[in-house]
Each structure stands twice: as structure tokens, then as C-alpha cells.
Amino acid sequence: MNDFIFHNPDKVYFGKNQINHLPEELLKFGKKVLLVYGGGSIKKSGLYDTVVNLLKTNGIEIFELSGVEPNPRHSTANKGAQICKKENIDVVLAVGGGSTIDCSKGVAAAAVTESGDVWDLVSNDVWVTKALPVVAILTNAATGSEMDGWAVISNMDTNEKIGLGGSALIPRVAFENPEYSYTLPTYQTACGAFDIFNHVLDNYYLAGDATFDMILEFQEAVMRAVVKWAPVAMKEPENYEARANLMWASSMALNSVLDAGTVHGCACHAMEHELSAYYDITHGHGLAIVTPRWLKYILSETTAPAIYRFGVKVFGVEEGLDPMIGAEKAIEAVSNFCFNTLGLKANLSDLGINEEHFKEMAEHACFGSVITGPKELAPSDVEAIYKMCL
Amino acid sequence: MNDFIFHNPDKVYFGKNQINHLPEELLKFGKKVLLVYGGGSIKKSGLYDTVVNLLKTNGIEIFELSGVEPNPRHSTANKGAQICKKENIDVVLAVGGGSTIDCSKGVAAAAVTESGDVWDLVSNDVWVTKALPVVAILTNAATGSEMDGWAVISNMDTNEKIGLGGSALIPRVAFENPEYSYTLPTYQTACGAFDIFNHVLDNYYLAGDATFDMILEFQEAVMRAVVKWAPVAMKEPENYEARANLMWASSMALNSVLDAGTVHGCACHAMEHELSAYYDITHGHGLAIVTPRWLKYILSETTAPAIYRFGVKVFGVEEGLDPMIGAEKAIEAVSNFCFNTLGLKANLSDLGINEEHFKEMAEHACFGSVITGPKELAPSDVEAIYKMCL
């Protein structure tokens, strides 16, 4: 069993009637707020007005960074960092999904550096222990960024999409109102749900040697919640229980509770980040295409028992089969969930992606080494998996 | 579904090789430490020497409060508070089980009040938002105090045992090394295990209307871990995996993860606190006696499905039965776990307790009102349950 540190000081206000706590939480950090958001969907939904009114009536001064991209760019984060420096911003308020929160973390980290360039931190793999405080209002159950210490930043000049981590990046406060995700389109709901699912699966200990049964069972419970509620949210976008389950699953998947004593894996995420970096596709969709192929690729007598168990516990695959056969059924169940239940297109070619860049993408994904996990993946393995996805 | 706030900033170092982080964590608060411990078992085990050496070699000044009782007294906490005031203590370091940590929280809270009397806070039901920081080194998997914001303090002058709560009482840092619980006697191991079990069961939503499936399933996973590993730890006191599972279960049971959206119940705990207050018995043993009787007493067509489900999921009671019959089997399984597996005596009379004080204990347990839960309990209900326990 591995030693571990559990520490997640994020204060989460979850539910319908929590937003009025926003001013008191922001004022703990100061009166100057940088409001960060994306393409304007929060204006349509009315959330923008709610937030701005709350802040203004409490004497909070608002500066804005809008237009954050779905795969947030380092250049956008740098723009935000410049505003923070110039205006002496006290706290960065992200209103949106994972991209907006990730960008806000990049802003918060870069704002306290001399260069103000987030890419200096990303490219030097700096563990961020100093940053402006980030407060998040979540509108999309997906990335878990509302409760974790990671941001994924893209540099489109160099086709790189890389994680920036650090204890200072965990939001100080997060507001999670499932109603804020009612307006999310079906496709985004599906992609977000699979992102959550894969955060857990990437970390599910597939060599069958889990250190804590209870943690393994927590992981299974979160994946079951996604399997149960994602199709409900897709059919009934204003089903509160469905949206609430997905939202809390998003946070639980990455708030470290499911990590205790495990080795945090990220095979599919590492492979997918290259797809988004090169082709700017929706992260959750890329994951859905990669995941069943990855499972097929790593399937062996060693991994079969755990993959089979996962199939039994999460998808109700029948018990008592030969582990290899059971594991194959589990992988079929994942494919069925991705491509039928969630309705996502199954192949990279459907998204206009061919094998042109696979070789260099595979090199990037391995960061000059291998991707660790239940089976180590060298660049040649990653390239083979990409080809299976065509 | 209920709104909720999740916030647990406690930083937990879990595992074998973590204690060297103690000085750096203490020094964040200052150089003057009040070391709080119980009857000296930490001296026998060598933990006392380890801690004192670590502190001294890092220039930390140590003051001591020893002799904390199993049901910690307000008078002992007050003694600690006086030391803190006189010596300008920066941080309270608890080394021991739940009683030592609870007492340390009482010290930390009282130390910043004018009177320095913890009973002023307890008896006025003050929600503690200001206290000295508490750091805990856990030696007994049981109360969850290492990760929660509660302390239970006893006043033997008035036969009162009452909880003191507050955000400031959550330990800032906790060290959980399962090896520190190796020397725990079998009886204490059993009592601690049932305390953990009941923390979850008291909070298990027995009206069958859980808001999050995943939270209900987390609760079941933690109870299963206790059922699986408690007998192992009793037979093999130095089984690391058993001690680790119980220790992390202790923390998970009360760190708020299992609360999300539920109504936190405490029926058995409220009833047991009176038993300890009047007769100074071991808390976990009192709980083991009360719990199966409580389940019997609240069993009805309304509660049967949830009690049955709990039996299926936690004890493997067979599926497909009539809910009332299934629920009865679940309650039998609880009794069997308490009185056979854990080997605890089944009746209050075995502990020398008769019905003399039941009436006033029942009044106390209800705090002049009722105990909420799957079935509301008035004093007459509580008295009836006590009588079932004879």
C-alpha cells in the first residue's frame, strides 16, 4: 500500500440556493475581481447578470476577460495576467466550464510571476505554489477543475496542450448549481460525462491490486452514476437530479478522494490531449474514441480480471465468465456507452483526422519517455492505439 | 435533493513514512507547542520519543498536557487552556486516539476565550470559529476526530457528555500511520471499529430516499471495509492492510464526503453519549449494544426497504426476500457482527448498568426535544430502547 497525502481545501457550495454567498467569499480576498468567461453563453442564460449584480451591489470592482476558448490558449491566459498586474486584481472569478476555470488558473499563476507568461510555467513544468486565489462558478460537469489543482493550457503555435499543476491552483471556493448546466447542449453533456467517466477509469487500478477496496468501490460508484445519469441529462436537460449527480461526480472524480493509496493514471488523457492540441476537437469526444481502443490494447491475462470486474460493477456484465471473455464484454460495454448511449461518433476519421501527425503526436504524448499505467505505453504503442481509432 | 457545503481543509499525511513532515507543519503556526496525550501508551510504543526528538531537533519548544481520559473531561481541557494562555502556545499537538484529539480541540477553543473554560462554549452550544490550530497524530481508528470539526467533552460533575462543533476545530494537519495502532488492545480495536461503523450507519439514509446513489454506495463501501478488516485487525494486530483500512475508514466516515446532500443523523450516538456520561463505558461498546436495538425499534414498512438494502450490501444478506424479513435478517447480521465477530458483550447489564437513570438519560439524549432521523425519537422512545438493551 502506498503512502499518500490528502489535502483539498476547496470550499464547495453545492445546490440551488448558494450563489448569495459569492460576495462574502470574494471579499475575503479583496475588492478587485477579474471575471473570466467564455463565449457568452452565461450572458444568454442570465448567469452573467446575476453575478455582476451581486458583485456591484456589494461594492466589488469588476474587470473582465472574456472569449476563453474551449481548449484555452496560453495567449488568452497571458492577456488575463496582464490585466491582473495592471489593475492589482485580488481574486480571479471563473464563470463557466472546465476551460474557463483552467484558463483562470493560468491567469492566477502567471499574474504573480515576473514575465506574466503562463507558458514559462507550463514549459518548465513548474509546480505552482503561488498564485492569485481562484473562485469558480461551474456551469458544466466535466473536467473536475472546480476541485482540483490542475489546468490544461494549449499553445496552438506549437501544437502543445500541457497540464499545469500546483497546490495553489485548487480553487479556494467553488459554486456548483446543477441548474447552471441546464442550457448545456446534448453533445457537450455527453462529452462532459465521458470526461468524468474517464478521469475515474484512467485511475482505476487495472492491474487488479487495489490497495483499498473502499476506494475501488468509490470509483465504481462514481462511474455507475455517470452511466446512469448521463443519458437522463441528455434526454431531459432540466432534470435536476441528473445534472446534480453529474456535477458532483465531476468534482469527486478529481478531488483526490478516489486517489487514496492508488497511483494516479492518465493514459487516455495523455493520448487525447494530443488530439485536441493538433485538431482542437472536444476533449471528451476524443477520450470516448480512445478509451475502448486503449482497453483493447492493454488487455492481457494480467489486466483481464480488473477490466472484467470493472465491467461487472459498472455495466452489469454477467459474473462467472472466463476473465478474458468477461473483459472483452466489458470493453464492448464501454464502446456501447460511448457510441450508442452517448451518441458520439466512433472514429477519428469521422472528425476529419488522419494518420498524418500520429508519429509526432505519439512522441509528444509520452514526453520523451513512456506513459505509465497498467501497461506502459511507448510512442510506438500510442501510435498503434491512434491507428486503432481511425 | 438538499443543498450542502463541502469544506474540509485538513491535510492528511497517511502512511508509514510521513512523520518527518511534522516539524515543517508545526512551524507554519509557530515554535511553541502544547503536546497532549493520554495515559502513557505512546511512551510504551516509542511514539512519544519519536515526536519529542523530532520537535527538539527542530527548535520547537514543548509544553505538555498528559493524562487525558477516555471520555475527556472539561476540567482537563481547561487545564490545557490555562497552559496555552500562560505560555502563549502557538499550536496544540494531539498524539493519541479520539479522546486525546477531542480534548485538544477543547483546549484549542477555550484557549482563545476570556474565561478559558471550555464548558462555557459547550453549554452555550457555541459554533467555534476561532481556536488555536490543532495538529493530530492518530493512534486509534475510531472517532473520526482527526478529520472532523467536532469534539465530545464530558462533565462528570453533571453527568453530561456533549458535542462541541465548529469549523475552527477541524485539525489543520493529521498524521495517520496505521502502524501506530498496532499496539491497540483487541477490545479497543473492536470498539473503535464499531464506532466507525455506526458513524456511517447513523447517517445512512434509512427512509430509502437517498439523494445521491453514489453517496449511499460510498457509505456501504466504508461499512463493508469495517466488516471485512476489523476481525483481521483483532486477530493480527500488526496486519498493515487491516489497520490502514480501519484508519482511513475512520476518517472517511466523518470528513463530510459521505454527507453530501444527506441529512446527518446521530440517533445511536445521542443515545450512547448518555451511557458514557453516566457510566464512563467505552463509547464503541455502548454503540454496539444500542445499535441493533435501535434498528429493531425503528423497523417499519417505511424503513424496512433501506434496512434490508443495507443488509444485502454490507453483510451479504440474500436478495429477493420480503423487505420486512430481509430487514430482520439485516438486524441479526448487525447483532452477530457486534456480539460474535467483535466479541462485545451484548447487554447493558453485562456492564453493570441498570434502569435507575434511564428516564433522565432519555431526557438528556433528546435535549428537551426529539432525536431526528428515519424515525423521530421522543424521550419515551429512547427509554424503551434503553430497556431493550438490558
Image: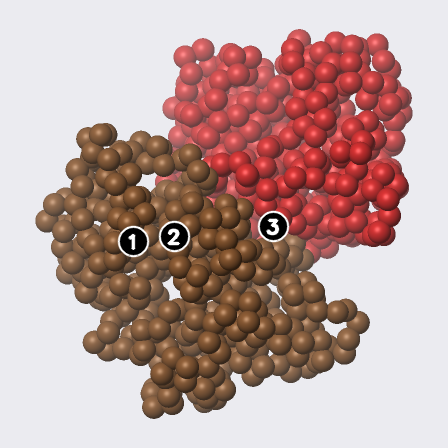
Chain colours: A red, B brown
Query: The disc labelled 3 sits on which kind of residue?
Result: Met
Query: The disc labelled 1 sits on which kind of residue?
Result: Ser
Query: The disc labelled 2 sits on which kind of residue?
Result: Thr
Is residue B265 something that shows in the picture? no
Q: Residue furthest front?
A: B235
Element at badge 1?
helix
* Viewer-nearest of discs 1 and 3: 1
Q: State the mark number for residue B41.
A: 1
The residue closer to the viewer here, B175 or B367, is B175
Q: State the residue position of label 2.
A: B183
> For the C terminus of chain A, which image quadrant?
top right
| Badge 2 density bin: few <14, some 14–19, many ≥20, Cα 10 Å | some
The residue closer to the viewer here, A149 or A282, is A149
Q: Is residue A310 above or below residue A301?
A: below
Q: State the residue position of label 3.
A: A214
Dot 2 and dot 1 residues touching (CB under 8 Å): yes
Parent chain of label 3: A
Dot 2 and dot 3 residues touching (CB under 8 Å): no
- Horizontal relation, residue A249 to residue A321: left or right: left
Parent chain of label 2: B
Using the rendered image, report if marks 2 and 3 lie on a common chain. Answer: no
Q: Can you give x and y, in whole percent of width and height, for residue A173 in the image?
A: 48, 41
Q: Can you give x and y, in whole percent of width and height, for residue B182 in the image?
A: 42, 50
- Horizontal relation, residue B49 to residue A295: left or right: left
Q: Is residue A40 above or below residue A311?
A: above
**Mark 2 to mark 1 CA distance (whole Å):** 9 Å
Q: Residue furthest left?
A: B86
Lower position in the chain sequence, tag 2 or tag 1: 1
**Mark 2 to mark 3 CA distance (whole Å):** 24 Å
Element at badge 2?
loop
The residue closer to the viewer here, A147 or B267, is B267
